[in-house]
Amino acid sequence: MDYKQCWDLQRSLFDALLESKAKSRVGLVSDGGEVRVDGDEAVGTVLIVEHPAVYTLGKNGKESNLLLGEEYLRSIGADFYRIDRGGDVTFHGEGQIVGYPILDIERLGIGLRDYIDALEQSIIDTVAHYGIEAGRVAGASGVWLGSAEERNLRKICAIGVRASRFITMHGFALNVTTDLRYFNHINPCGFTDRGVTSMERELGSAPDMEEVKKLVINNLSKNLNVKIYKN
């Protein structure tokens, strides 16, 4: 799905959930994966997509971490957007599972830090299914392989979110079979001393994309303690 089209959809769902909360209405029904707790009460939507090649820069990111000009990026078929999430610059492209949970986490009984932990844990659990040992790194969001001590840290999943009145948008990007050469044009997430990787690179072969997507959804359901219904 085109990034701008998906961003517009995110914002429409985000604004609708904010308005619903302000008016104390219960639930949100919309296209996408509807998320429910407490029986049949909907608390948001999760979008799971793949994007054509695109670079995005978070609101506090440094443009110096984009190593090539926008004109050149477009010449190689990649779009570029400055957006309203946290974090720095990252890349989205085919072979990458991008998840956008638009949720009222107050209804889930958790704060923003616990929410981000749940996203990270869902990816850690997903890649563990394939024997990939991943974890967290102090002071850096996302899911990582390797260790700082061995100087072989590499990110397999980027995370950047926005929240207002406990309503979330943006989310995570898991490299499954992503063409990692696109990351050569940026300092991913602002780091110059750490690499990126994909499930395909770590495994030596490409996992089934649909299977990985199902695992991601199941692990999000588990770690957020919700039911996700595919529409």
Image (tube, rainbow, N blue to C red):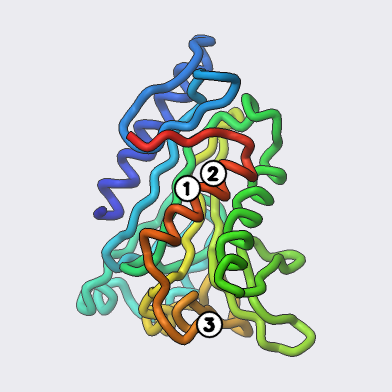
Say which of marks 1 and 3 sits in front.
Answer: 3
Of 162 and 92, the residue lying toward us: 92
Say which of marks 2 and 3 sits in front.
Answer: 3
| Residue 67 in view | no
Q: Identify the amino acid type marked 3.
A: Glu
Categorize mark 3 by other alpha carbons within 10 Å: few (<14), some (14-19), many (20+): some
The residue that label 1 is drawn on is 170
- Say which element carries label 1: strand
Provide residue 213's location: percent of width, then percent of height.
Answer: 42, 56
Of 78 and 147, the residue lying toward us: 147
Q: Identify the amino acid type marked 1.
A: His
Say which of marks 1 and 2 sits in front.
Answer: 1
- Side of 112 where 74 appears, left or right: left
Residue visible at 36% across and 59% down? 210
- The reply to whether dot 1 and dot 2 touch (C-beta < 8 Å) is yes
Residue visible at 45% across and 46% down? 100
Q: Quadrant of residue 208?
A: bottom left
Q: Is residue 55 above or below residue 169?
A: below
Residue 37 has which mark? none
Q: Is residue 60 above or below residue 132?
A: above
Q: Quadrant of residue 223?
A: top right
Categorize mark 1 by other alpha carbons within 10 Å: few (<14), some (14-19), many (20+): many
Provide residue 115's location: percent of width, then percent of height.
Answer: 65, 43
Provide residue 177's location: percent of width, then percent of height.
Answer: 39, 74
